[in-house]
Image (tube, rainbow, N blue to C red):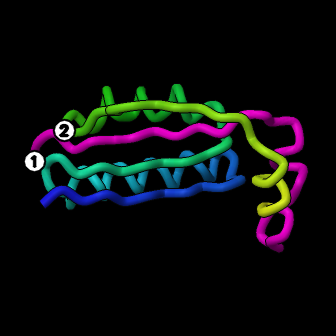
């Protein structure tokens, strides 16, 4: 059975974003079925480097199946600002959000 999970980090920045990603990747690698996918969304640009490094050096049974980027839209900004959990200072200078599709290869 192939499953799909999503980790939406919204406006979280490092180090919190990295800590959550590392924990999610470890849990995914340990518990997901072969072929399962973990979708990670974030505005943190450093995760591009960090996710690749972490998978290559610490979790050999998963891969980055795809990596996409898209412009942060006014709608995204308005949605984040409508919540008390987000501060505009966290994303005001950023224009891109990122999406990684992680796939489990083996146990």
* Mark 1 or mark 2, earlier in chain: 2
Magenta residues, start to end: 81-107
Q: Is 77 located above or below residue 52 in the figure? A: below
Residue drawn at point x = 18 percent, y = 56 percent: 2
The outermost residue toward the bottom is: 84
Side (left or right) of 18 relative to 85: left
Residue at numbered disc 2: 61
Please give left or right for residue 91 compared with residue 2 in the image.
right
Answer yes or no: do the residues labelled 1 and 2 have beta carbons within 8 Å? yes
At horizontal 13% and vertical 49% (from top left) the residue drawn is 34
Residue 92: give x, y in percent of width and height: 88, 43
- Residue 60 counted in the magenta span: no
Q: Which residue is mark 1?
A: 107
> Image point 52% across, 40% down: which residue?
99
Q: Give the camera-side residue of 23 and 98.
A: 98
Residue at 40% x, 55% y: name it. Answer: 24
Q: Quadrant of residue 43?
A: top right
Q: Is residue 104 magenta?
A: yes
- Expressed as whole percent of the image width and height from the top left, the position of residue 12 reads 68, 53
Measured as percent of width and height from the top left, residue 85 is found at 77, 70
Left or right placement of residue 60 versus residue 52 in this view? left
Give the class, few, some or many, for how many residues have Cα within 10 Å of label 1's Cα (few <14, many ≥20). Answer: few
């Amino acid at each position: 059975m192939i499953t799909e999970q999503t980790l939406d980090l919204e406006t979280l920045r490092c180090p919190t974003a990295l800590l959550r990603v590392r924990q999610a990747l470890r849990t995914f690698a340990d518990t997901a079925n072969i072929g399962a996918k973990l979708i990670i969304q974030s505005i943190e640009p450093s995760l591009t480097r960090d996710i690749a490094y972490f998978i290559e050096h610490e979790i050999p049974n998963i891969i980055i199946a795809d990596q996409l980027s898209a412009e942060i839209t006014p709608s995204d900004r308005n949605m984040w600002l409508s919540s008390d959990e987000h501060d505009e200072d966290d994303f005001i200078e950023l224009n891109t959000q990122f999406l990684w599709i992680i796939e489990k290869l083996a146990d």
